[in-house]
Image (spheres, coloured by chain):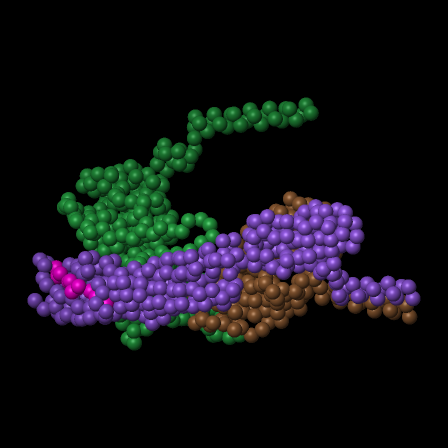
Amino acid sequence: MKNGILLAAALIIATVVLIVIGTVKPIPSAEHFAGEQNLLPSSSTPEAAVRNLGDEISLGHWARAYDSLANKTQFSEDEFIHDLTGYYANLRTDATLNSFEVRPLHATENDAEMRLTLHWATVLGPSESTRDLHVTRVGDHWAPEWPLDKRPAVPPQVIPVNYLRWDVIYPGPGDDWGVQGVEAPHVRIVDMRPVQRAEGVVILGELLNDDVVPAYVSVTATLQSKTGKALATEDSFDKISHVLLPKQVTPFLIDFPDATLSSVGSIRMSPFSTLVPASADPVIEIDNAHLNPAPDASLSGELMNESGQIVNVAHVLGTFYDKSGQVVWIGDEYIDRALLPQTPQAFLIHIPEDLARNVSSQRTVVSSFEYGGVL
Amino acid sequence: MLRRLFIGCAGVALAAGLAAAQPSVRVEPATLQGPRALAEQTANSVIQDYLQSWRSLSVALDQNNPELLDADFTGDAKSKLAETIREQAALGMSTHYQDLTHDVQIVFYSPEGLSLELTDMVQYEVQLFDHGKPEPKQQVRARYVVMLTPAQVRWRVRVFQALPGD
Amino acid sequence: MRLLAFFASGLALGVAPLAFAQSGNLTLPKAVEAGAAFSIATAGSGKATLYIAGLGQVVKRQVDLGQTVNFPVGTLYSAGRYVVVLQGDQEPESGEFDVVPAKGVAELSFLARPSRLPVGLHDAITGAVYVFDAYKNLMVAPTPVSFELSGPSGAAQKRTVVTRFGAAWTEFDSTARQGADKFVANAGAASTRRVISQVPGDPCGLTMTAKRDGKQVELQTAPIRDCSGNPVPDGEVVTFTASFGDDQSTADVPIKGGIAKIDMPIQDGALISVASGVVMGNQIRWEK
């Protein structure tokens, strides 16, 4: 009993002593994470300088990151932060930098070109951005120059909008059998094709809202064996534009990982639609959409927000067809920058290399999301 | 000899008991009017769900527990059966229903698919219990008209009514 | 041998339930109208308990045998088969009778579909009706139900159908004119109305024009109508596509004020096309 009391007293005293030591003379790494001092290695090489900048960005140490720049007099710290996270709410606003890569492009004794690839984790998955930085020697260390992406400012103006919007009154609670409801929007699958890929079976298709009201849509597919037994059921999840205006078409892609097409006897497709409040605006134009051949096959182009409202997140879906007009692939990209009115925003959708040579045409659609509004 | 006879009688009694628990069911070909075709799978599931509803009502009226109706009944059929259970409970009664035979025929499938009607010449036993004391069993033969409506995963009975005079 | 008799009687009980007299000391009505007053006559003397049990209601009364038991209006209102048991000092008596639906249709369950459909479709509007009395009993006796579908212009399609097991159905064509149609079902004094929205069909003869507007080209459709001449509603998407070499520009533009219109940057020599859903419109080769 006595021994136990002694042990407890010893532990308490030791803990207090360690706390005092840690507070009076902390170790450098603790100081760094507490924001007291810079632990990062010195910027003795161009690569180290850019790597340090990446570390500061990933830790959210904006002031330190800004201070490390050779060209900081050309813009303010706020402009630097907005260049990375966006001025208006967008996918990057709440994203964190997961990792980054630094790749030297060119170097001399006094300056160098480095490529910084930032891997962001957004609410809709990973997002990547790349910047080529000029790095210069400043005395005994190197300092990167930040290539600030100066976006054109749209002149202040008033854009008249004939606001077209659909609202829905849903049935109240209780048994509504025999009471007239509102018909779910009529949608139909206008194209469907299963494809075998290395990672499994993929079902590609297009869905049309055949009605005069907007629809929230999704597509579910069930793979059935040759004996009619259900093998797996999946839905289109995010490879679809979920809100379709009347007569609008969306591509859809349904993934069946690890499935093999040879064991599939039939596929049951179930399009789902329900009424949803929606707005006919904004109209987003897709300009200069261009198929880039392999290697690095892709569809590139620009989005132009034709309305006066800011689009916080845009989802670009590309449908790729072969010469006979058959769908061969569907790809997508979330734009991690807000679309400002009348301001072009580039997009790039990658196309699998093995399919790229079969692609002869494309069709691109954009769905938009506004924070605080409807999908 | 007696032992053999005892075993034989017990076997027959057991078979009779089992027969009482599992009613014999005859399904007549549907005589549908209307533009909507009735898939065999739909017809089978409707009849299966309808027969299940007899089991539910039997247990619910036996135990005076209206919650046991939820899975198989909806709308007015459920309200009326639940009201019967409340009345029984207030009077200190319960009722035991045992369906013996069914002769089912689907007679109407509404064009939009939201309702289906069948008739059933059903033979069943009723036994009342007053404060647990059994009254004599009574056998009833009546033709029921039943309307079912689709719910999320099954068909539920919405109208359940014996036709007069049969 | 006694044991044999015991099992034989047990077997008989299991196979054929007890049979009870329907008459004797108990006189039952053959049928009672839902909600109406009725009476049950008893014979004999002494006290007894009378039970009336059905799937819709249960009644229990203490009675003096030899008296007629009167049940006031509203006692039994749920249609169906009821069993009756009279339990006194002597052997119980039993019987059964029917409660039949009350006279006069009081309520219709009217399933009208669809609530919205394109104009000019054959037999596309359906209506199914179930008829009920004031106590929500299905009226199983044949009952005439009249259906009427009338458009905004007043022209009506009418049909009368007699119910079978309480149900009747019909189907009508959608008319050539868009608008909200009234779909009414009548039976006796009961009437129920539904609204069927007839909407324009696919665009017909979709055409556009193009003209220079500063650095851009203004693309505008002619007023968009379906093949019956109904204006296609605002909000339907029209897709403009401009192709030049390997480059393509597209815009999904909702119709506003009967037309779709947008300014697009279009190069000389580009091929411009217009479509709505699966309907293709004209094409224009853009030259300065």
For the point 52% across and 69% down, the residue is B107
Colour chain A appears in: green
Name above or below for residue A69 compared with residue A106. above
Is residue A262 rendered magenta in the image?
no
Name the image quarter holding residue A66: top left
- Counting from the top left corner in percent of width and height, residue A72 is at 22, 40
The reply, left or right, for residue C42 in relation to residue A82 is right
Name above or below for residue A10 compared with residue B68. above
Image quadrant where one finds the N terminus of chain C: bottom right
Image quadrant where one finds the C terminus of chain C: bottom left
Name the image quarter holding residue B6: bottom right
Colour chain C appears in: purple
For the point 79% across and 68% down, the residue is B12
Q: Nearer the viewer, residue A12 or C45?
A: C45
For the point 40% across and 57% down, the residue is C191
Q: How many marks?
A: 0
Viewer can see residue A336: no
Q: Nearer the viewer, residue B158 or A37?
A: B158
Name above or below for residue A21 compared with residue C12. above
- Counting from the top left corner in percent of width and height, residue A1 is at 69, 25
The reply, left or right, for residue A75 in relation to residue B161 is left
Colour chain B appears in: brown
- Counting from the top left corner in percent of width and height, residue A237 is at 40, 58
Task: Write down the region rendered in magenta.
Answer: C216-226
